[in-house]
Image (cartoon, rainbow, N blue to C red):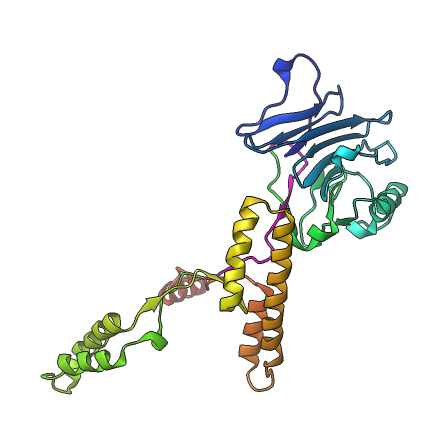
Amino acid sequence: MTETVPHLGPSSNRPTLPGMKLVAEIRHPKYGSAMFVKPLLDVSDIHTNSSDTNIETVTICLPEISITSLYKPPASPFLWPDLPPKCRKKYAVVIGDFISHHTMWGYDSTNSDGELVESWMENTCMQLELIRNAKLPKSFNSCHWRRGYNPELCFVSQRLAHLSEKAVLNPLPKSQHRPISVTIKPAITKSEVPFRCRFNLKKAKWAEYNAGMEKALLDVEPTPDNYIMVVQAVKKAAHAHIPRECQKEYIAGLTEESLQLLEYYETEFVNDPFSDTTSELGDALMESLGKERQDLIENINITQNSKKAWSTIRKLNGDKITPPTISDITPNQVRNQLVANGR
């Protein structure tokens, strides 16, 4: 976690954050930067840099990835300071206040700083890619200009771009800024489905079900008065001989072979998400699922069953399934309100 905090003075006035450990900081009376990490995180190297134009960078190095926080004052031209060789890892994440305008990240026009940032992104040896979602809200809302801006940008290595997701969090108290977060997800994520228990008819014991129904209805006369008894007999036999199951998570196109590969990948991802083994398993898993999903798409006949076709496409896209909302307002309440409005 990085933060721009102006601070000077003794160590007793250093910034703190509950549950986090301060590992690097740049002290400045007006600007200043600080970086916090989890207490158990293994940080191998730390590098800080403050230029004559007050551009600040704080870099921490993990075994396979470097994370850099940048702050550029509004009046300073953008200039990226070269990182030392010890901070040049296989993967990189650069996040911070670039304070530059470019149509690439949502502005109407491009200024000189935006062109410099774009040129740096395309020519840097770190091979970075901008992470942006046009649907996200602005990360800075100016009370003076009464509009939103995106001064905070996030760049990640190109090999991590398809796994990275940016989010804009809730506004900070007494501040015009909203924190941004970047999450590097696994190559395959399980889609959450609503909690609904259903009968699995493929695993039903139909012989036992029929025997239970015949035994329960042996002495029951087929009259309307005995309808409730028949319903209760059906429920009892179904619960006894037809299993009910609920699937909380779902991955479209997952086969038995892919399931075993997924278990290996999840184990390696927990141990080290940026290792070569994790990357190779992720690529193999994506290739295996890609073939299965391609077969599913080729077998879709949208002209015969468009509902099933679109349902399959939504599953492949990983769209979240939201359960329908049931209103607490009854029809009688609507009727009473209409009558009251007409008086």
Q: Which of 331 and 285 is in front in this view?
A: 285
Vertical order, 224 against 275 (above or below): below
Residue farthest left in this picture: 219
Residue farthest front in this picture: 277
- Residue 323: image location, x then y, percent: 46, 63
Vertical order, 131 against 46 (above or below): below
Q: Does residue 283 belong to the magenta stretch? A: no
**Residue at image point 57% right, 80% down:** 306
Q: Nearer the viewer, residue 138 or 113?
A: 113
Q: Magenta region: which residues?
A: 173-193
Q: Is residue 251 visible?
A: no
Which quarter of the rendering shows the C terminus?
Answer: bottom left
Left/right of residue 257 with respect to residue 287 in the rendered view = left
Classified by dominant secondary structure, the portion drawn in magenta counts as loop
**Residue at image point 54% right, 60% down:** 261
- Residue 284: image location, x then y, percent: 62, 62
- Residue 255: image location, x then y, percent: 51, 69
Q: Does residue 182 belong to the magenta stretch? A: yes
Left/right of residue 337 with respect to residue 180 in the rendered view = left
Left/right of residue 210 with respect to residue 283 in the rendered view = left
Left/right of residue 33 with respect to residue 222 in the rendered view = right
